[in-house]
Image: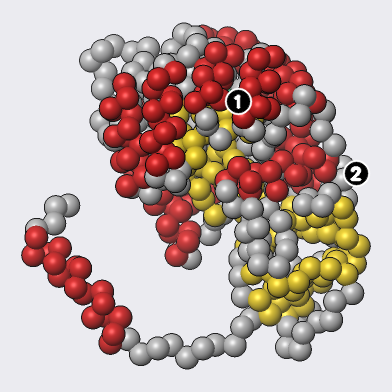
């Protein structure tokens, strides 16, 4: 769509006029809800509150504790013996897509197919207890469109922090590689080479709604380029990308499996390294020094090796997965024990949406306590997203985003795979009958 100068001037003047003619809405009484349950896991302090009550006014929490007085006229949701937690956060999803067949995914589906089904995955994600996700790459800004529809209340789903187009080099993880030079797929391109193109693509992403910038700093598994561990941008390019993103107030998430691209990304100043499978000792040291988060998708390997052959993915892709899978888990343990900051991210969309919580058991198996795994998916994730105090915790002023599970997730972390209640911004999405 192109605006004429005239149309633009109408647009610019219309809104103040419209605002003047609207009669001010009558203030409605705030809606007070009280949610109570046997236990509340508080990841911020790493403690458990028994006989917990959370007082919610409209979309925010006003009070959290035990033995609070129920305000007059409040609706009470009694979750009885359940355990409440803040809504979970997944820092690495591709919420607009899910693979089914290699050939179909590349050649039959268009961005319209993805746009049509994205809302289904959004609902599955929030019903699984994930009330906030960072979407780290979708075609054609579908993630931004989905976020807007959710924020408006037209679609049910988590709060989305979108990246828009993930930025790839030519022949890199985000480029269609491995086919004839005559095979071209049309659409908005996330490919940029050299400082000038990269800066321009960052600007376009910001212009079209990206809250975070995602760069594909090195090779990938599920793409046909040969080297999963290799770098795909120079240090100079990454430095410029992080600098440009920072100018617009955006953090950067860098996809990197290999030791070298991981280190380049950290040196450039990214906020998080995604996957980080082959990180070496120097990378671990640098991540600690720079306070860089690692977002390691340590469940993924199981699903890819079990299902992707059947879905027609070529052997060279499966071979790359075998190269990183086990080592990634060992390095998760090593980096965590060395004191590197970890935020929860699954790559859901590579496997079915709604299965996000399956990763908790792997994080516990590879060195975390259940509380630490929960902290990765709440307070740490909120910190990485720059949203501490709003999400990932339940405290006065935070969004009333909360979930419940029947048992005790600190004893059995797989309880998080069976979320029975979800509230987002004070609205019940799943479960929980109120007492009146
Ligand atoms: N999206 C990632 C890629 O293609 C998936 C990597 C999955 N493997 C893993 N072990 N985490 O590179």
Taking the spot 80% from the left edge, 40% from the top edge, the residue there is 372
Q: Is mark 1 within 8 Å of ligand 1?
A: yes
Taking the spot 49% from the left edge, 26% from the top edge, the residue there is 268
State left or right for residue 83 relative to residue 74: right
Q: Are marks 2 and 1 in contact (CB under 8 Å)?
A: no
**Cα gap from disc 2 to disc 1, whole angstroms:** 27 Å
Taking the spot 72% from the left edge, 41% from the top edge, the residue there is 376
Rendering quarter of residue 327: top right
Q: Residue 171 appears at what percent x and percent y?
A: 36, 16
Q: Is residue 363 visible?
A: yes
- On residue 275, the disc is 1
- Of badges 2 and 1, nearer the viewer stands 1
State left or right for residue 332 relative to residue 91: right
Q: Residue 52 appears at what percent x and percent y?
A: 85, 66
State left or right for residue 436 relative to residue 243: right
Q: Earlier in the sequence, mark 2 or mark 1?
A: 1
Taking the spot 68% from the left edge, 20% from the top edge, the residue there is 285
291 vs 342, nearest the viewer: 291
Q: Which residue is mark 2?
A: 411
Above or below, 145 relative to 218: below
Tag 2, which secondary structure? loop
């Amino acid at each position: 769509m192109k605006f004429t100068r005239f149309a633009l001037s109408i647009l610019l003047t219309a809104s103040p006029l419209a605002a003047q003619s609207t009669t001010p809405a009558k203030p409605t009484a705030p809606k007070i809800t009280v949610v109570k349950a046997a236990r509340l896991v508080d990841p911020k302090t790493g403690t458990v509150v028994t006989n917990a009550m959370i007082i919610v006014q409209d979309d925010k929490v006003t009070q959290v504790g035990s033995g609070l007085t129920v305000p007059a006229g409040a609706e009470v949701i009694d979750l009885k013996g359940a355990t409440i937690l803040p809504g979970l956060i997944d820092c690495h999803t591709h919420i607009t897509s899910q693979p089914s067949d290699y050939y179909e995914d590349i050649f039959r589906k268009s961005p319209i197919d993805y746009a049509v089904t994205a809302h289904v995955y959004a609902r599955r994600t929030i019903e699984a207890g994930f009330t906030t996700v960072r979407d780290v790459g979708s075609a054609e800004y579908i993630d931004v469109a989905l976020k807007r529809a959710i924020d408006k209340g037209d679609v049910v789903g988590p709060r989305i922090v979108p990246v828009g187009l993930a930025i790839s080099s030519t022949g890199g993880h985000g480029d269609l590689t491995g086919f004839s030079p005559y095979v071209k797929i049309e659409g908005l391109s996330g490919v940029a080479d050299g400082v000038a193109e990269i800066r321009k693509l960052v600007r376009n992403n910001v212009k079209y709604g990206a809250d975070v910038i995602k760069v594909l700093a090195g090779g990938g598994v599920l793409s046909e380029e040969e080297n999963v561990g290799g770098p795909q941008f120079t240090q100079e390019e990454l430095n410029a990308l992080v600098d440009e993103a920072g100018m617009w107030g955006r953090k950067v998430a860098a996809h990197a499996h290999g030791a070298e691209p991981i280190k380049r990304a950290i040196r450039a100043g990214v906020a998080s390294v995604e996957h980080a499978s082959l990180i070496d000792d120097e990378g671990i040291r640098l991540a600690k020094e720079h306070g860089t988060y690692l977002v390691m998708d340590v469940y993924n390997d199981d699903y890819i090796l079990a299902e992707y052959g059947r879905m027609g993915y070529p052997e060279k892709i499966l071979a790359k997965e075998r190269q990183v899978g086990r080592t990634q888990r060992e390095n998760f343990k090593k980096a965590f024990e060395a004191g590197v900051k970890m935020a929860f991210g699954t790559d859901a969309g590579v496997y079915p949406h709604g299965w996000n919580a399956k990763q908790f058991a792997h994080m516990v198996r590879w060195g975390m306590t259940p509380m630490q795994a929960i902290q990765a998916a709440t307070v740490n994730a909120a910190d990485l997203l720059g949203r501490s105090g709003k999400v990932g915790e339940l405290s006065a002023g935070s969004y009333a985003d909360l979930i419940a599970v029947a048992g005790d997730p600190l004893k059995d972390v797989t309880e998080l795979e069976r979320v029975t209640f979800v509230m987002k911004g004070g609205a019940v999405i799943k479960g929980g009958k109120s007492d009146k």
